[in-house]
Amino acid sequence: MTALTTKRFTIEEYHRLGELGFFSPEERVELIRGEIIKMPTTKTPHSFCNTRLWQELFKLLGESATLRVQEPIILSADSEPQPDFAIVRNQDDNYLSSHPMPDDIFLVIEISNPTLKFDQTTKLSLYAEDNIPHYWIFNLIDNHLEIYSQPYQDLRGKFNYRHKQIALPNETIPLPHFPEISLNLSRIFPP
């Protein structure tokens, strides 16, 4: 009996599929550990939170970092997620030559309702494995912010974050790498 195998894609193969029109223009897909993942359509609470967060971060960060919204980041030869937000180092060419890589990334943010479990497991492990120092999940199901920091690998080889903190929608929290900047969560979460 022949064993079944799954075809895993490299970033180059994934990009080639896009060039060949394999994905429709309105289709939102990500490459996660070689698998092409179709992301669900955005619902109103997600859109509200996304818009408010973009407005606040844009004002707060100014020219101190680059704010990328639903744009790819390169994590390995087989992963190119498109997080809702990535705060990355400024680069002279504004990432024209390449998408940001782990050393460029200060913070990755996901806004989650239907993708919550995926963001808390698969993406969390992926970001920790690539040593992304800070990962936030705006959890719209439980209505709080999950703050993860200090990635590590356990003795079984699994990747996670040492610290998890919960911030409530009425709190103000500092942005990682920018201690002088604080984000008022009451301006972000849907009422």
Image (spheres, grey):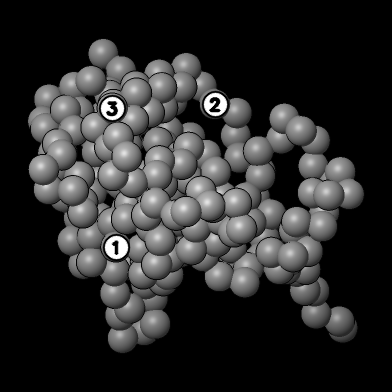
Q: Is tag 1's residue or tag 3's residue first in the polypeptide sequence?
A: 3
Badge 2 amino acid: Thr
Question: Mark 1 or mark 3: which is in front?
Answer: 3
- Which of the numbered marks, if any, corresponds to residue 42? 2
Report which quarter residue 2 is drawn in. Answer: bottom right
Vertical placement of residue 131 versus 21, above or below: below
Task: Estimate how packed mark 1 is, as few (under 14), some (14 to 19) or many (20 or more) residues with alpha carbons within 10 Å.
Answer: many
> CA separation, marks 2 and 3?
24 Å
User: Residue 188's x, y, as percent?
Assistant: 27, 24
Find disc 3 in the rendering and name its residue.
59
Q: Is residue 166 left or right of residue 106?
A: left
User: Residue 166's x, y, as percent?
Assistant: 17, 44
Quadrant where the N terminus is found in the figure = bottom right
Residue at x-position 33% and y-position 78% = 153
Q: Is residue 160 left or right of residue 42?
A: left
Task: Estimate how packed mark 2 is, as few (under 14), some (14 to 19) or many (20 or more) residues with alpha carbons within 10 Å.
Answer: few
The residue nearer to you, when weighing 52 against 180, is 180
Q: Is tag 2's residue or tag 1's residue first in the polypeptide sequence?
A: 2
> CA separation, marks 1 and 3?
23 Å
The residue nearer to you, when weighing 9 against 108, is 108
User: Residue 185's x, y, as percent?
Assistant: 20, 28
Q: Is tag 2's residue or tag 3's residue first in the polypeptide sequence?
A: 2
- Which of the numbered marks, if any, corresponds to residue 133? 1
Report which quarter residue 123 is drawn in. Answer: bottom left
Badge 3 amino acid: Lys
- Looking at the rendered structure, the secondary structure element under dot 1 is loop
Quadrant where the C terminus is found in the figure = top left
Residue at x-position 43% and y-position 65% = 102
- Looking at the rendered structure, the secondary structure element under dot 3 is helix
